[in-house]
């Protein structure tokens, strides 16, 4: 009995609480049952869901839920201080403190080992990074964390961006503070979107805290539809093709043919979309059942006609956050600010540290000097250079937000270059005025290929593996083995075909299917739910795979 209760209430680092596990749905059913009694009492329901969210995060990340609580306390009081201050100097000081604290905590967990290793490599020192919070956890609750490794708390990047946007919007006078710390804690920790987004703006969510509970018949059907769609994407498609094909190829590409490497690249583009959008579909559906509306985070991104459009369709909450809180403050497409030069200098420093080479250092400094001279002495080129630097900074920092490695830096840089290329190509393209189906097909195809190439760097365990994948495609294709590969992995390829075909169906057709499901009687919903759950869980061929974006 004690072991049973421990399994329910204590954190197990080998079995975190995720949407695809039955324990989550039991947890959600219990939460929803209690919620049904208090859903129209805003103060009580905020407190109730705040406690439920803290428990959810504890089961997902263990002792590090304390870090979430600390983040909530700091940003709540700083937000109030900014709002109460009349002097611009004080307001700006409080804002700087908030941004510094948030970024310092995020950087400690995500980048400490990178900077320590880079510093040791550059200067021959022997500094050692230590995870003090893990040591505290080991001492207080008996965990067994390795102090020489810094465990990345689940969802820290997401809730850090949420709390930053809260204090920034108060500073910009676009938002009034919440009424109390419980409401703020509920906003930050709301469990459906806590660990992998979407990143929720306070201006969109906080007003819902004070509204009465409402859920129309249509919204109920929508919520069920979104949850089922998310489970199908994640488990039946994403996990299946990953476990049975993609992971094998990316682990050791030299053991497979170039055709298998190529199909793994296309497979990963689909897996990542199904995994991440599947999570947000479930999050949106679960939140909607409790009467809270979360914003759409994906809009058929592989239908994009260029790289710029892709970033208006993929991870919309992150790309819009980067635009509003980074790109535009840097000057956008109009000018450069002091922030432009500071961030550009920071990125160049990161590249120098990662390269650990004096040759690269000299080359980087020469490149920076060339840009400075062009901006200073060639006025006709200055504005274009400044706006492109802002675009590149935004995408490079977006890459580093995901992790401190060459892979993420290259991935972000390639997307930045793609956006810049689109800008100039639209001006000179002989097809710019054409909008026929064939031309649009070519645009979508080219964009999809480019994005798939960038995902190789995103997925690969290191830079050498990414290069090996590309090399394998061009030097080891072996057309004669293609029929055998297709026969061996026909189930995987059929699922990939199904995933891409449904993705590329017209939005009108997909909305029609959705609305037909929503209009079905409730007993039909129940039958469909049971059928889908049975089929989805029959497709499981290994332990549940954690959502990819949990690592960010």
Image: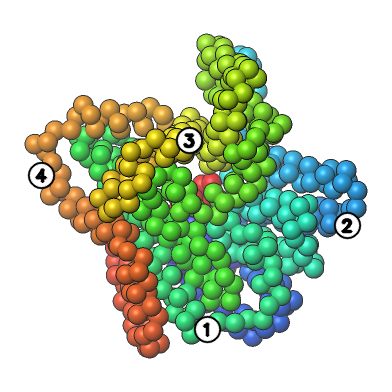
Q: Which of labels 4 and 3 is toward the front?
A: 3
Please tell me the numbered disc located at residue 483: 4
Q: Quadrant of residue 149?
A: top right
Of the numbered discs 4 and 3, the one sitting upstream in the chain is 3
Give the residue at x 29% y 66%. Answer: 538
384 in relation to 504, above or below? above
- Judge by depth and name the residue closer to the eye, 54 or 163: 163
Tell me the distance, in whole angstroms, between the alpha carbons under discs 2 and 3: 42 Å
Q: Which of labels 3 and 1 is toward the front?
A: 3
Give the residue at x 50% y 73%. Answer: 26
How many C-alpha atoms fall within 10 Å of the one at disc 4: few (<14), some, or many (≥20)? few
**What secondary structure is marked by label 2?**
helix
**What secondary structure is marked by label 3?**
helix
Left or right of 471 in this view: 179: right
Badge 1 vs badge 4, beta-carbon distance below 8 Å: no
Tell me the distance, in whole angstroms, between the alpha carbons under discs 1 and 4: 51 Å
Please tell me the numbered disc located at residue 216: 1
Of the numbered discs 2 and 1, the one sitting upstream in the chain is 2
How many C-alpha atoms fall within 10 Å of the one at disc 3: few (<14), some, or many (≥20)? some
Please tell me the numbered disc located at residue 420: 3
- Judge by depth and name the residue closer to the eye, 424 or 195: 424
Tell me the distance, in whole angstroms, between the alpha carbons under discs 2 and 1: 39 Å
Q: Quadrant of residue 39?
A: bottom right
Left or right of 159 in this view: 466: left
Q: How did the renderer colour the structure?
A: rainbow
**What secondary structure is marked by label 4?**
helix
Q: Position of residue 490 (x, y in %)?
A: 17, 53
């Amino acid at each position: 009995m004690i072991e049973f209760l421990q399994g329910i209430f204590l954190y197990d680092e080998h079995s975190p609480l995720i949407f695809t596990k039955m324990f989550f749905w039991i947890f959600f059913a219990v939460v929803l049952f209690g919620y049904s009694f208090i859903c129209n009492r805003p103060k009580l329901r905020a407190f109730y869901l705040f406690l439920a969210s803290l428990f959810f995060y504890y089961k997902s990340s263990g002792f590090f839920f304390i870090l979430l609580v600390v983040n909530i306390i700091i940003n709540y009081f700083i937000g109030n201080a900014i709002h109460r201050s009349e002097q611009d100097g004080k307001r700006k000081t409080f804002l700087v403190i908030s941004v510094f604290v948030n970024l310092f905590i995020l950087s400690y967990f995500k980048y400490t080992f990178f900077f320590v290793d880079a510093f040791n490599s550059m200067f021959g020192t022997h500094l050692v990074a230590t995870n003090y919070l893990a040591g505290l956890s080991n001492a207080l609750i008996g965990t067994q964390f390795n102090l020489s490794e810094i465990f990345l708390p689940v969802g820290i990047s997401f809730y850090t961006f949420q709390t930053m946007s809260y204090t920034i919007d108060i500073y910009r006078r676009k938002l009034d503070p919440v009424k109390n710390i419980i409401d703020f804690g509920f906003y930050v920790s709301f469990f459906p979107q806590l660990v992998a987004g979407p990143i929720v703006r306070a201006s969109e969510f906080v007003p819902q805290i004070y509204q009465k509970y409402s859920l129309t018949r249509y919204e109920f059907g929508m919520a069920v539809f979104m949850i089922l769609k998310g489970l199908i994407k994640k488990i039946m498609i994403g996990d299946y093709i990953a476990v049975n094909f993609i992971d094998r190829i990316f682990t050791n590409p030299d053991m497979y043919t170039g055709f298998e490497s190529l199909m793994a690249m296309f497979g990963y583009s689909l897996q990542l979309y199904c995994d991440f959008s599947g999570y947000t579909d479930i999050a949106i559906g679960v939140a909607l059942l409790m009467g809270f509306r979360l914003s759409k985070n994906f809009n058929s991104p592989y239908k994009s006609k260029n790289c710029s459009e892709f970033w208006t369709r993929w991870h919309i909450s992150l790309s819009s956050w980067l635009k509003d809180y980074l790109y535009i403050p840097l000057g956008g497409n109009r000018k450069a600010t002091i922030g432009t030069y500071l961030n550009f200098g920071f990125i160049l420093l990161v590249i120098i540290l990662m390269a650990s080479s004096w040759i690269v250092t000299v080359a980087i400094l020469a490149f920076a000097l060339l840009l400075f001279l062009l901006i200073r002495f060639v006025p006709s080129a200055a504005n274009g250079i400044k706006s492109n630097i802002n675009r590149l900074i935004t995408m490079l920092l977006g890459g580093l937000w995901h992790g401190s490695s060459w892979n993420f830096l290259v991935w972000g840089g390639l997307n930045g270059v793609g956006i810049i290329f689109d800008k100039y190509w639209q001006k000179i393209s002989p097809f710019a005025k054409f909008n026929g189906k064939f031309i649009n097909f070519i645009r979508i195809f080219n964009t999809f290929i480019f994005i798939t190439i960038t995902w190789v760097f995103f997925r690969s365990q290191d830079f050498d593996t990414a290069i090996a994948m590309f090399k394998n495609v061009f030097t080891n294709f072996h057309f004669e083995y293609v029929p055998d590969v297709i026969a061996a992995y026909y189930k995987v390829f059929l699922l990939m075909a199904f995933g891409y075909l449904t993705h590329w169906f017209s939005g009108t057709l997909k909305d029609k299917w959705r609305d037909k499901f929503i209009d079905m009687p409730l007993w039909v919903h129940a039958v469909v739910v049971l059928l889908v759950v049975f089929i989805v869980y029959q497709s499981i061929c290994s332990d549940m795979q954690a959502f990819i974006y949990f690592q960010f």
